[in-house]
Amino acid sequence: MKSHAEHPWSVGDVAARVDLPTNVLRHWESVGLLTPARDDAGRRRYGEDDVVRIAVIQRSKAAGMTLDQIAVLLDDSSWGRHQVLQSHIDDIDRRMEEMRRSRAMTEHALRCRSHDIATCPRFRAGVDDVLSRF
């Protein structure tokens, strides 16, 4: 067992600092994303490496990765890592394009004089890709 000094934070301490409920950290442990040390009483003790993993998980989730994808990302022996990461990059690119379109439509709507924005021909052009399916 590593010393308490190497693992200074309890699950409550870490949860409060990263603004997560403690049950989320416990869930991440149950699915194998975290393996905090335990003290003599069996309580979780998080060290710096654990906190870094939590930060990676949070950032990855914010970027839209699933816990399964994150597990592959954090598993240094996973042969499927590059495939998962490329798939995620492709998904980010798709979402970024959707956000770009949404922003352009919103900016147009802000400047458009049409009272019913759906009747504006230029605004409707922003949804032509969806309308083309009908």
Image: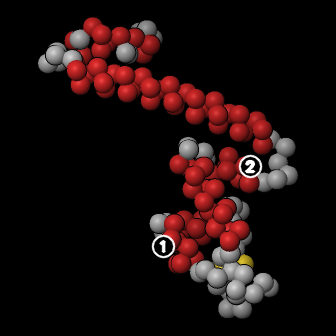
Residue 4 appears at what percent x and percent y?
70, 87
> Residue at the location (51% across, 30% down)?
96
Q: Secondary structure at mark 2?
A: helix
Apparent side of residue 77 relative to residue 103 in the rendered image (left or right): right
User: Could one spot residue 32 in this view of the protein?
Assistant: yes
> Residue at the location (78% across, 43% down)?
81
Residue 118 appears at what percent x and percent y?
24, 16
Amino acid on which the number 2 mark rests in the picture: Val
Res 32 quadrant in image: bottom right
> Residue at the location (68% across, 75% down)?
47
Quarter of the picture containing the N terminus is bottom right
Quarter of the picture containing the C terminus is top left
Q: Is residue 115 above or below residue 86?
A: above
Q: Is residue 82 above or below residue 114?
A: below
Name the residue that disc number 1 marks. Answer: 16
Name the residue that disc number 2 marks. Answer: 72
Q: Which of the numbered marks, if any, corresponds to residue 127?
A: none
> Residue at the location (44% across, 29% down)?
99
Name the one closer to the observer, 42 or 125.
125
Q: Residue furthest bottom?
A: 40
Q: Secondary structure at mark 1?
A: helix
Could you tell me how many numbered marks the image carries? 2
Between discs 1 and 2, the one toward the N terminus: 1
Residue 65 appears at what percent x and percent y?
60, 45
Q: Is residue 128 above or below residue 104?
A: above
Amino acid on which the number 1 mark rests in the picture: Ala
Graded by Cα atoms within 10 Å as few (under 14), some (14 to 19) or many (20 or more), the crowding at tag 2 reads some
Mark-to-mark CA distance, 1 and 2: 27 Å
Name the one closer to the observer, 105 or 124.
105
Render colour scheme: secondary structure
Residue 123 appears at what percent x and percent y?
30, 14
Graded by Cα atoms within 10 Å as few (under 14), some (14 to 19) or many (20 or more), the crowding at tag 1 reads few
